[in-house]
Image (tube, coloured by chain):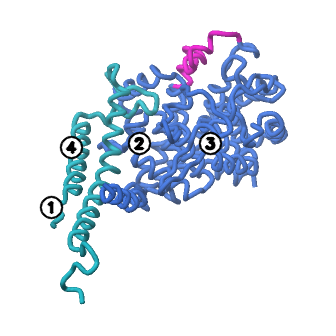
Chain colours: A blue, B cyan
Amino acid sequence: MAIAAGSLAVGAAVWLPCVHLLFAPSADELPGSGVSSLARAVCERQLGVWHDPQLRARELERMRSANAEWDFMARTFLVLALGNLAERDPSQRERCVEAMDAILDETVRLEAEHGHSFFLLPYAEHSPWVVQPPRSLFVDGEIALMLGARCLVANREDYRPRLRARVSTLIERMQQGPVLSGESYPDECWTFCNSVALAAIRIADVLDGSDHSVFLARWVEVARAKLVHPATGLLVSSYDLEGVPSDGPEGSTIWLVAHCLRIVDPEFARDQFERARRELCVQPLGFAYAREWPASWEGPTDIDSGVIVPGVGASASSSGFALLAAASFGDAGLLEGLLSALNLAAFPVETEGGVRYAASNQVGDAVLAYALTCGPLWEKVLEAGQ
Amino acid sequence: MSWRTSPVALLFLLGAALLALAFGLVHALGLREYTTVLSGTRPPGAGDGAESAAALYLLAWFGWTLGVPILVIGALVSAALERLGASAPTSLGGDPQLP
């Protein structure tokens, strides 16, 4: 018995520290100055879905049946990924821009035909919006961000007034609350959506030569004062229009928030990233994953948190966005650990049309595509600011 | 004593073979696609048992990637230990070759 237990212990001691070597990303899969083989494969698959009407309808239906927001977010993150891909690989520029336009035009058409609620969860219509007429900052912000990303890659004159109009709406609605945040749902503000809106405003400033720096600085100042979770120093994920928190910090929110704030207030963004890394990241045996909540606050498992793996607390949603943040802030160690975990536990499926992940879905793969191509769009904005 | 006749090693190897077989089976049945439930999405045409199928695949996968190698290494180590034990003297002075 002692021999059996000792032998298994030796087996575990030898094998467990080595497992990550089997799943570590190869050098050409890691993001660098060009386009990594993995980024290309994931983007190809995403483009394939977009260009195949049947496949696209099936994938979108799968997501919409769980959460209509994912249909919308999959579009946003794919447009951002294509924008970065176009910048990284000029030979792909025309193809990427064409796809960005197709996605944008269809998204705006659906919004015009069905209204904002087409991309929202049903409870958007269950209670009155505080600011009238009803509009979701989630929808306005991401459409503005898509328009901005498109025009950063290559200007399109007819998109510029649309971008200006969206930005004007964003600012007007954000200024109506004491914490300068707009509603994504009735009397429900999200740092996720507001930071996307701030990034879109910042991009519009770069494109148009406008200056909303006072508004952007004021938002950060108010957020530092009223939207920070005291125990962690992380921004809370949601709050009402008056700024009263509904949730604490969440991994599925804070990583993207930090990424977006990079072009608004780099110092505050870095602070949030470092705190999130400390509070949410776990790096066992060469792998890495992110938890949805810090130890000092636990929220309910919901559509945003996704499935939480029992025992370890790993969240697919938080880990996916952590990949984006790790790429954005140049944290190579975290990025490699997260990619190793992705290879271990997200089950890559190689097809003729590229790579997808069985444990993921269309929006998860779009976030991954954006994470793997992350860099050029934000660099353009940061360079313009200098 | 040879490792081939070590009962503990044989048991470990049998366990490894069963884990490998279990993974091969669930993989061949296409249960990998059911892991999409981890992202809150259901696989196309999935019935009520999608979550159970995903859990089964995950267990089999980690059995294959973690359990099988640990059992194989454990089998080698236990065979080596039993072999050492068999060739070692049973009591002090009991070995006629010792001076």
In the displayed structure, A338 sits above or below B3; it is above
Q: Secondary structure at mark 4?
A: helix
> Which residue is labeled 4 in the image?
B21
Task: Name the N-terminal-most of marks 3 and 2.
Answer: 3
> Which residue is labeled 2 in the image?
A346
> Which residue is labeled 3 in the image?
A255
Cα–Cα gap, marks 3 and 2:
19 Å
Foreground: disc 1 or disc 3:
1
Q: Identify the chain of the residue marked 1, using the numbered disc in the image.
A: B
Quarter assignment of residue A172: top right
Mark 1 near mark 3, Cβ–Cβ under 8 Å?
no
Cα–Cα gap, marks 4 and 2:
21 Å
Q: Is residue A120 magenta?
A: yes
Identity of the amino acid at label 3? Answer: Trp
Q: Secondary structure at mark 2?
A: loop
Q: What's the magenta region?
A: A107-128
Residue A240: x and y in percent read: 75, 22
Of the 4 image quadrants, the one containing the C terminus of chain A is bottom right
Of the 4 image quadrants, the one containing the N terminus of chain A is bottom left
Instruction: Name the disc covering residue A233, or none.
Output: none
Residue A375: x and y in percent read: 58, 51
Q: Is residue A270 magenta?
A: no
Foreground: disc 4 or disc 3:
4
Tell me if B89 is positioned left or right of A134 in this view: left
